[in-house]
């Protein structure tokens, strides 16, 4: 294993990790802001409202992540193959579909709001609770398009070489949510109405910040490019359909979380009516536990978010080593940071519970949080592994693990414990995560990741600035061409492209410092040969070396410029982009 093979993916991962951590932490703050502030001002009744309307957020997550996660994975793969027009048309199609669907939800949700709450166990028998739920839910549903747009823009901006702006948009919006909650709920005493207005305003602010990306040239998504992108024979529709299949394979968990939250609230309220437990206090504590989960999962979510764009790209490039190495980095960082955070929260369960403004329920909430914390290592591993399978093209395994975790195991365990042992309801979490982890490990062994392509049809090498062993690489590449019985003309074109582009990188891009590498991947896909050349040098686009400069240059500069021009004339397509601190050339023969 060469050092250069690890250097570039490691650099890319840690470059994205910090913005992902900031986004995950601030998002967790926004997730708990309503419960934290409303609980302190309104008390247990306010927390009950937040818990009851939480299923609406699960519905938003189901649709939003279904579009954004799968859509951005397909976008990353199209980008890796240099298909700029298809990538832009793909984003435009998803945007139009999502806005139409969100408008429909906003209208129907408000028209059917009372029957929906009746299904959730809230009826006219408790008019105060129903009135508070309606006050919160109506503006929430009316703002569905804003929430959906935020989902889509965040993931696409992150994949389109602008993770810092994506992190900034989410972070500023999350902090704004918390601050507005303090002002509107604590100081202006607007109750649950202030809480939802804070959330909507924060979402709108995030959207405005993220839209700045489309006015820059940092990625391929610009307003002009999106509007003018052509859709060849319905390719965008096929890509959008494919992305929904990928995204929904894991976002379906939010549908089952919707069912789980509704079922859990109903079981605890029913147990209270039977006199087994104090139902209202248990529902309030259930909401506290769910809010604690937003904090404890933040490190794992950050690691998964940092990993996914790179796994999608390396998977499309068929670079299995880099793909798996990024997963190892994500698992290592996520498990270490997540375990430390979970242990701290477990020890501070009392003060954490008190923050939510229900001191009368500490005897329930403290053990509930501590029991929940037992589930986090297994849950965190599953989050990262499912994200890896999804972005790496194994959506069947990702969907299977998601179904186990959120439906096949979770719902029966919830029914049994909630019906017969409601006082021990919190054990639902460690039991579900442990069983899912064990079953998933067995499935991973039985269904080991299989390479779709023949191993002889992928060629990978790493070169460093110190040795520059290009002669050895060219010799190995020649053997690769012969082994795959490539047409002599195409073989010559391939070798010319690799040699010239690597040479110009050595001479013009590298600064002479240690730690500069070239990562080369050649993939034979049917009739096409695709070459990916990634280097860790400062920004350098060899395609800008045009004939005008050649006439002004002398000596080696002339040879370098002519070499690049020869490559451009010989190949079908040659694309450059700067992505996560690396120069990336994609050559299609």
Image: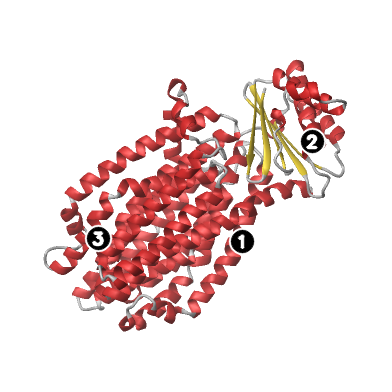
Q: Residue 408 or 588: which is nearer the viewer?
A: 588
Please tell me which residue is depicted at 83% across the width and 24% down the height of the picture: 559
The residue that disc 3 covers is 136
Residue placed farthest to the front in the image? 552
Local SS, label 1: helix
Q: Which mark is residue 333?
A: 1
Classify residue 118 by image quadrant. bottom left
Marks 3 and 1, the one that precedes in the sequence: 3
Local SS, label 3: helix
Residue 325: x and y, percent?
66, 50
Horizontal side, residue 213 vs residue 554: left or right: left
The residue that disc 2 covers is 508
Q: Residue 189 or 450: which is nearer the viewer?
A: 189
Local SS, label 2: helix
Closer to the observer: label 3 or label 1? 3
Q: Residue 311 or 398: which is nearer the viewer?
A: 311
Note whether residue 268 is visible.
Answer: no
Considering only vertical position in the picture, is 548 above or below 192?
Answer: above
Closer to the observer: label 2 or label 3? 2
Calculate the distance from the C-alpha at mark 2 to the C-alpha at mark 3. 60 Å
Marks 1 and 2, the one that precedes in the sequence: 1
């Amino acid at each position: 294993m060469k050092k250069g093979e690890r250097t570039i993916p490691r650099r890319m991962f840690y470059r994205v990790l910090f913005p992902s951590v900031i986004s995950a932490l601030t998002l967790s703050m926004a997730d708990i802001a309503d419960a934290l502030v409303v609980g302190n001002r309104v008390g247990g009744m306010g927390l009950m409202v937040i818990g009851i309307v939480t299923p609406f957020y699960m519905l938003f997550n189901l649709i939003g992540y279904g579009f954004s996660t799968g859509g951005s994975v397909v976008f990353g793969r199209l980008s890796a193959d240099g298909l700029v027009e298809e990538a832009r048309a793909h984003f435009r199609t998803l945007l139009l579909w999502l806005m139409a669907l969100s408008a429909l939800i906003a209208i129907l949700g408000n028209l059917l709001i009372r029957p929906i709450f009746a299904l959730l166990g809230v009826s006219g028998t408790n008019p105060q609770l129903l009135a508070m739920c309606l006050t919160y839910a109506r503006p929430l549903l009316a703002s569905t398009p804003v929430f959906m747009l935020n989902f889509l823009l965040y993931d696409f901006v992150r994949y389109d070489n602008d993770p810092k702006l994506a992190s900034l948009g989410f972070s500023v919006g999350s902090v704004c949510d918390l601050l507005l909650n303090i002002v509107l709920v604590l100081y202006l005493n607007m109750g649950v109405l202030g809480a939802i207005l804070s959330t909507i305003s924060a979402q709108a602010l995030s959207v405005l910040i993220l839209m700045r990306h489309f006015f820059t040239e940092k990625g391929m998504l610009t307003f002009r490019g999106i509007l003018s992108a052509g859709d060849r024979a319905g390719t965008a529709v096929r890509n959008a359909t494919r992305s929904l299949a990928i995204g929904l394979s894991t976002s379906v968990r939010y549908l089952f979380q919707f069912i789980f939250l509704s079922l859990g609230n109903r079981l605890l309220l029913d147990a209270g009516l039977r006199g087994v437990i104090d139902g209202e206090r248990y529902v309030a504590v259930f909401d506290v536990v769910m809010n604690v989960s937003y904090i404890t999962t933040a490190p794992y979510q950050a690691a998964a978010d940092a990993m996914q764009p790179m796994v999608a790209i390396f998977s499309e490039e068929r670079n299995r080593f880099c793909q798996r190495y990024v997963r190892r980095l994500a698992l290592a960082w996520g498990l270490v940071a997540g375990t430390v955070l979970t242990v701290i929260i477990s020890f501070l369960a009392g003060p954490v519970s008190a923050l939510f403004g229900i001191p009368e329920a500490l005897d329930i909430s403290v053990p509930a949080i501590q029991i929940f914390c037992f589930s986090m290592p297994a849950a965190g591993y599953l989050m990262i592994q499912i994200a890896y399978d999804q972005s790496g093209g194994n959506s069947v395994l990702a969907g299977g693990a998601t179904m186990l975790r959120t439906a096949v195991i979770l719902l029966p365990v919830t029914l049994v414990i909630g019906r017969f042992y409601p006082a021990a309801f919190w054990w639902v979490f460690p039991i579900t995560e442990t069983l899912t982890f064990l079953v998933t490990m067995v499935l991973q062994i039985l269904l080991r990741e299989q390479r779709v392509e023949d191993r002889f049809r992928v060629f990978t090498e790493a070169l460093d600035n110190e040795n520059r062993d290009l002669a050895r690489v060219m010799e190995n590449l020649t053997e690769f061409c012969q082994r795959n019985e490539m047409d002599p003309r195409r073989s010559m074109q391939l070798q010319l492209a690799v040699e010239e582009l690597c040479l110009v990188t050595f001479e013009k891009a590298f600064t002479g410092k240690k730690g500069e590498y070239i990562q080369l991947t050649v993939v034979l896909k049917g009739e096409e040969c695709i070459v990916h050349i990634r280097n860790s040098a400062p920004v350098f686009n060899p395609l800008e070396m045009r004939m005008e400069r050649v006439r002004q240059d002398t000596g080696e500069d002339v040879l370098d410029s002519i070499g690049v021009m020869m490559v451009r004339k010989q190949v079908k397509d040659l694309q450059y982009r700067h992505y996560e601190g690396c120069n990336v050339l994609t050559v299609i023969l």
